[in-house]
Image (cartoon, rainbow, N blue to C red):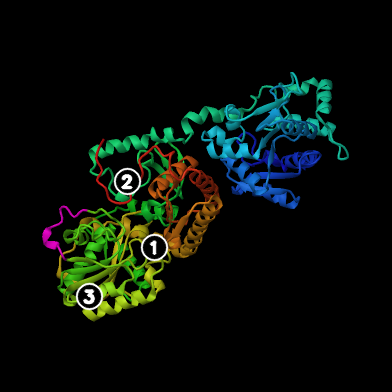
Amino acid sequence: MTVIAIIQARMSSTRLPGKVLLPLANKPVLAHVVERLSYSRLIEKIVVATSIDSIDDSIADFCHENHILCFRGSLKDVLDRYYQSAKQYNASTVVRITADCPVIDPVVVDAVITGFLSGNYDLFGLDGEFPDGLDCTVFSMLALKQAWLNAKLKSEREHVGPYLENNPQLFNNGSLKIFKGLQHHRWTLDEPEDYLLLTEIFETLHNPNSLFLTHDILQLIQKKPELLTLNQDIVRNEGYLKSIQNDGVLMTDLETLKNSQGPKLYQRAKELIPGGTQLLSKRPEMFAPDIWPAYYSKAKGCRVWDLDGREFIDISIMAVGACILGYADDDVDGAVIEAIQKGVNSTLNCPEEVELAEALIELHPWFGMVRYARSGGEALSVAVRIARAKTKREKVLFSGYHGWTDWYLAANLQDEKALDGQLMPGLEPNGVPRGLAGTAIPFNFNDIESLRETLRGKESEIAAIIIEPSRGEEAPDDYLKTLREIASEIGAVLIFDEITSGYRMCAGGIHRRYGIYPDIAVFAKSMANGYAMSAILGTEDVMQAAQSTFISSTNWTEKIGPTAALATLKKYQSEQAEKHLITTGNRVKEIWRTAAIANGLEINVTGLPSLAAFAFKARHPLELNTRFTIEMLEEGFLGFRQFKPSLAHNSNDLRLYELAVSRVFGLLAGDLECTNLDTPKHHSGFQRITKE
């Protein structure tokens, strides 16, 4: 059996920050812990398990400099950190030690290990009458894995042993009774008063040539009983007791999520708002019905707080791709606040719309003019209107998803399933005038022969060919070139819908990467980092047709949208955001693949790095998606089978995400039939929402 001692260590103690590297007898506390454990006869490896938080870099550096094995994992989920470190170093028996115990006694540690090995135990430790600071618990790797898989309470994730200790019916637990009546002694390091006592102990007893043990400390205190008074008023196991107190408020188990404020408010919303929300992609039913938090109280960077104050790391759709720099970006918000203070609208026009037009055309010099709107759907409708005005034709050929407006939904008037192959099935054309039947004609992505067949005989009737130049994968060059040629041949306006693809792989439109230029490109979503803004860029010849029809709106003249778009573009370019987005997206795709392989799950990973997605290859994919989302909520993530990275996501966020995905995929692999899913599965397309 491989016996490994794992020392949990962090610098961010609330009561005594940096305590594990404080000096005692000219050496850091952590050095004493490692040295004393090295005297054990039974421990084969010693590993320090710290967090990936930057504050713990000093611990990792200390370990590296002193040739000590070190594992870095979750800061808050200590149980996961422990399990992952034990797994990495192939432990069969794990000895839990904390770095705040600089007088840990190797004789006592060996006695506990011997006790564990002598019986068929899952957990073995000291009884309750030992001095605080000799803490040592031994787990079997199998028991530790069970705790890792099943522990839900905050106290059970922040601490390693509680799940095993709190479920004696599941585990064979034992203890060693070698101390009696010594529980009032406190030799751990958690408060400044503790440090005073330990300083006295080490100054008196430390000898570089020999090791002092428990009986030496007891003899010292017998000689100097006043030492007991230095820290006698401190509550034992205060951190654990506080985490237990918070379990009822902060735990994120299924029942807590169900009964939180967000799902309750959403039930009320369905009585007041048709469909419950303003955007289909933000309906809770698209993620985990009855569970998804639904509403936020605050968002910053890549973190979102729900109405109950729970913090989640958003590794999902990041405001449906709108917040490319992260939530509440200081630079963009600062520019907007300044604009607000100067007045967001007036009888006169804001100069920012001219400045933005110049910046956008500088990025896309093949265009000559710009019009603005404030949302993607209306901007695309403007583009279609301009194309029809320019060509004096009515019919539109399209591929992909293009929003909610009449010109697009008209495709379903003749064939109610015409749009099912264009990303969003189930869209009903109710309310769309029947007279628009036949004006919107879909064709399949990258299928030129199908397009030519659809086009045959209608060449002189087509006003526009509209596509998303790229969404799931990079666009094939031949496909885009042929579309460009066909549009030019028949006199149709070629429109690239860059509402989703814009800014995700480069500043401006993704078509910049291909060197194939449409007559019009439409932008929204990411261009203003969450503020309402959209733009229609086109050649001067085509865009002048806007003056032969009527396109106008008061709110298209306000100042906030162009200001936010300019600030977003400026920061995007200065930070070279596309490099970070691509690297981050590829890293998450690799996390999915690696975790799936490790747990025997079959998934299909697709998409551009900045529009990544995975799908379960199983009999019940919707159920697995739903359970994945729920389990990730319990792990502290807004997690979904899609990911739209932002500049705000950093390596620490991804490391925590990797740990969570590994654990959740492990759970899913053990229940592919989804017998543990007791909530409705998520929706896969448009479905009518009814109040309950």
Kindly state the secondary structure of the residue where label 1 is placed.
Answer: loop
> Which span is picked out in magenta?
428-438
Q: Is residue 508 left or right of residue 57?
A: left
Extreme-top residue of the structure: 181
Give x and y (percent) for residue 574.
47, 64
Q: Which residue is mark 2?
A: 283
Residue in view at x 84 percent, y 31 percent? 204
Q: Which residue is mark 1?
A: 472
Q: Which residue is mark 3?
A: 492
Of badges 1 and 3, the one in the foreground is 1
- Compared with 286, 233 (above or below) is above
> Mark 1 and mark 3: span between their CA atoms?
25 Å
Give x and y (percent) for residue 159.
60, 35
| Circle 2 crowding by C-alpha within 10 Å: few under 14, some 14–19, many from 20 | many
Q: Is residue 138 left or right of residue 618?
A: right
Identified by mark 3, the residue type is Ala
- Compared with 672, 191 (above or below) is above
User: Does the stretch in magenta take in 437?
Assistant: yes
Identified by mark 1, the residue type is Gly
Question: Dividing the picture into quarters, in which one does residue 285 lie?
Answer: top left
> Mark 2 and mark 3: span between their CA atoms?
37 Å
Magenta stretch, main secondary structure, is loop
Q: Earlier in the sequence, mark 2 or mark 3?
A: 2
